Amino acid sequence: MTRWRRRATTAGLILLGTFVITAPFIMLAGANPFAAYGEFLISPLTSRYSALEVLVSSIPLILTGVSVALAFRAGYWNIGAEGQLLMGAVAGAGIGMIAGDQSRFLVIPVVILAGAAAGALWALAPALLRVKLGVDEVVTTMLLNPVALLIVTALLNGPWKNPETGFPESERIAESAQFPILVPRSRLHLGFLIGLAIAGIVWFVLSRTVAGLRIRAIGTGPKAAQFAGINVGRTLLTVALTSGAIAGIAGASEVSGIQFRLTSGLSSGFGYTGIVVATLGVLAMPTVVLAALLLGDLNVGAGSAGRVLGVPSQLGDVIQATVLLVTVGVLAYRRYHVRTGAQEVSEVEAIEAVDTS
Amino acid sequence: MAATGDAPATPIVELRSISKRFGDVLANDQVDLSLLAGEVHGVLGENGAGKTTLMRILYGLSIPDDGEICVDGQPVHIASPKDAINAGIGMVTQHFALVKTMTVTENIILGRTGGAILDLDRARDLVQESADRFGLHVDPDRLLADLSVGEQQRVEILKALYRECRVLILDEPTAVLTPQEIRALFSTLDRLRASGMAIVFISHKLPEVMELTDRVTVLRRGRVVHSVETEEVDAAGLASWMVGRPGEPPESKTHAKPGATVLEVSNLSALGRLELPAVSDVTFAVAAGEILGVAGVSGNGQTELAEVLSGMRKPTAGSIRAGGVEIAGEGPSRVVAAGVGRIPEDRHEALVGDMSVAYNLVLEHLEEVSRRGILDRSRIRESALALIDRFSIKAAPDDLIWTLSGGNIQKVLLARVLVREPQVLVVSQPTRGLDIGATRYVRSELLAMRTKGAAIVLISEDLDELLELSDRLIVFYEGRIAGRVDAAKADRDRLGSLMAGHTEVA
């Protein structure tokens, strides 16, 4: 299919562009760019443990990537996945701390639902402001991120401070709230399957259902969607809350799968990286999952590249940021390029549109 | 009111034999236009007549295929707005190019800072002086965001004055103004004219053109049809020039066999842009198998009427009954459910450009092509193929709408609406921007719907189209029905006079 060929070309251009831009910096850091990229991208896949670690570090990125991509598809610019994730983590940890020795089969679903509910709740105010009053959600969702982090910090320095150590971290959650490990002798936990399942569900809803068609319509042609009788406000609200819920699950999954307690360093910007993942994955769920895996690979590789090549491990962040910028640039260029052809034909109409308005 | 001297002065600007083609459409066809010092020159024409193209050429936004532009008798090359500004030409478009977060003074000097040091004082002096001389009152230190639309327009005019323009183009300047602001603008324009400036005044509003201009040029289908002293003509004459004489005999149309009344609109009122009344106390009815044409110079409430009938604008008063169901104030989905098909004047507002033809065709009736919320994709595809075949749309089901030509986009919209066999059809400017073949096709489909018994409201600025298709006509003027005419007995002079605001006692 030509659509997939186009996407493959786009991905190739992005990777090439990123390499060309970052190579000088890698050389400045005293390493061979080819060797460095080998270390960043290939070597994590060469051992069983590090390959599984790639999957582990992709889990929150799959979830936040899907969360952001879903919102963006509806034209709702949710920049608040970070805060929604943190609130999901708070809720998940809260349940985990009081779960005691209840059955796992009861506690884990409750943890996931609590994370989802908290994330959705954190997304509610900006969504309502947007739908009812037209307040730009970019600003409101983003500004709620530091608020969520402050709430976490306040909890950890106050009521949830670890009574044994006095550290600003919560007590360990009950055994029953911890996600099962999928592969022995690894950290790969249930969150991976949850992430894939949610990505699959969102893909199905968007591409195969009436609700998904409505979401896509309001995302690309809100006026036409309204004309066709679609309730734009209600659809936006649903999408915004669902997006928040998925980010919230990412937070609960980090608590129950990795940290086993609430910490203030629980998220290394997963919500923001979700925007990179969603953009890199061109907002389509299969490619979003691939993008999350790629960035997971890069995360693991950046750690080992630091040790092996003696380059700063922050180079991983540099590459990740460059990938985002190049992606945005390439996508804008390709879109613009494709469109110019059609614009010639419709110039008369464009002029008439000016004429009538 | 002519302020020109006695001698036939050299025009400041002269456009000679300007032609511009877009694809198949000749937007300007050997247009001549001369602008004299100290005159207000009206440029009139329906949408698509070529006014905006001509002004874009003069201001360097568009390059003509043929012809030349002379300033002070010398041919000049105007390839960009910068060239135009250097030649002393300024333009105020309908969409202001102003920075909302800057002050009036900053906006005025923006784009002409002439060196590293900002000459804010000179700009402030100009604002002060212009306020006294031309009545352009605006506080130089206010932020743009705090100004009314009328004040913002004054800033645009000040910007042109700061750039020392001698020719000022105003593209429908009154469309966004309140009546008081229009008075103020007119007195400013009078004073600018007296100072020796040439002003191009583009408008649809005939009384304004009659009142303000010294000369008027009427464009139709890209050509100048008349260019006269305003004193020599009246509003009705201008209206009939704008809509033209019949080009070809209307397609033969069967006699109307009107059935029962299907659409009843009573005492309908609605607000338009800027919350000003746009439709006032309008009452009419349309029977099955009948086409009611709505005529009028654009901007007299027809757009708002179409929006209200389509469920896209809430009326402030009155009732709309379609097949006995009250739909006034209902949203699009209820209106569609009541059996109303809608073809809006801007097709891009009805179809999602970035979505496939197949999905756009079913967008209004998703329940019928899905089961338990899951789309029946093979059925959507099959029905798309059937409609593409029946309406001869040159596209595949998976093609995105924006890749289609205007004619095919309109056919997609027609297909989506007509396949439902709606009992009421609200159609706005159905053939605007279409080529002759597509125009014929659309008109024949509308006549076929009439034969099938639909009650059709046809809103159009193309008088030929209205006369060819309609059984009865109503004429809108300032949001009211100025007259009702039987299409078979309609005469253009009478329609022109109604469109110009001469209400008849019914």
Image (cartoon, rainbow, N blue to C red):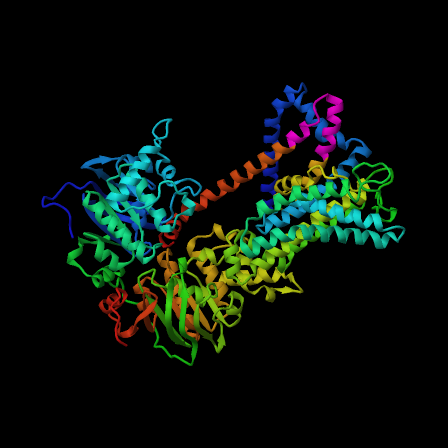
Apparent side of residue A296 relative to residue B377 in the rendered image (left or right): right
What residue sits 37% from the left and 50% below the top?
Answer: B149
What residue sits 44% from the left and 66% below the top?
Answer: B308
**Quarter assignment of residue B296:** bottom left
Toward the bottom, the furthest residue is B260
| Picture layout, residue B190 above or below residue A31 | below
From the image, give the main secondary structure of the stretch colored magenta: helix
What residue sits 50% from the left and 76% below the top?
Answer: B325
* Image: magenta residue range: A297-319
The one nearer the camera, A165 or B256, is: A165
The one nearer the camera, B406 or A159, is: A159
Q: x and y percent of residue B328 in the render?
A: 47, 71
**Quarter assignment of residue A292:** top right
Apparent side of residue B169 relative to residue A166 in the rendered image (left or right): left
Toward the right, the furthest residue is A101
Apparent side of residue B63 relative to residue A110 in the rendered image (left or right): left
Toward the left, the furthest residue is B6
Whether residue B107 is visible to the viewer of this picture, yes or no, is: yes
Q: x and y percent of residue B281 in the render?
A: 37, 71
Whether residue A79 is visible to the viewer of this picture, yes or no, is: no
| Residue B154 shown in magenta | no
The one nearer the camera, B500 or B14, is: B500
Toward the front, the furthest residue is A158
Q: How many marks?
A: 0
| Residue A312 shown in magenta | yes
Apparent side of residue A104 relative to residue B506 in the rendered image (left or right): right
Q: x and y percent of residue B117 in the render?
A: 37, 27
Q: x and y percent of residue A277 in the render?
A: 65, 40
Picture quarter with the C terminus of chain B: bottom left
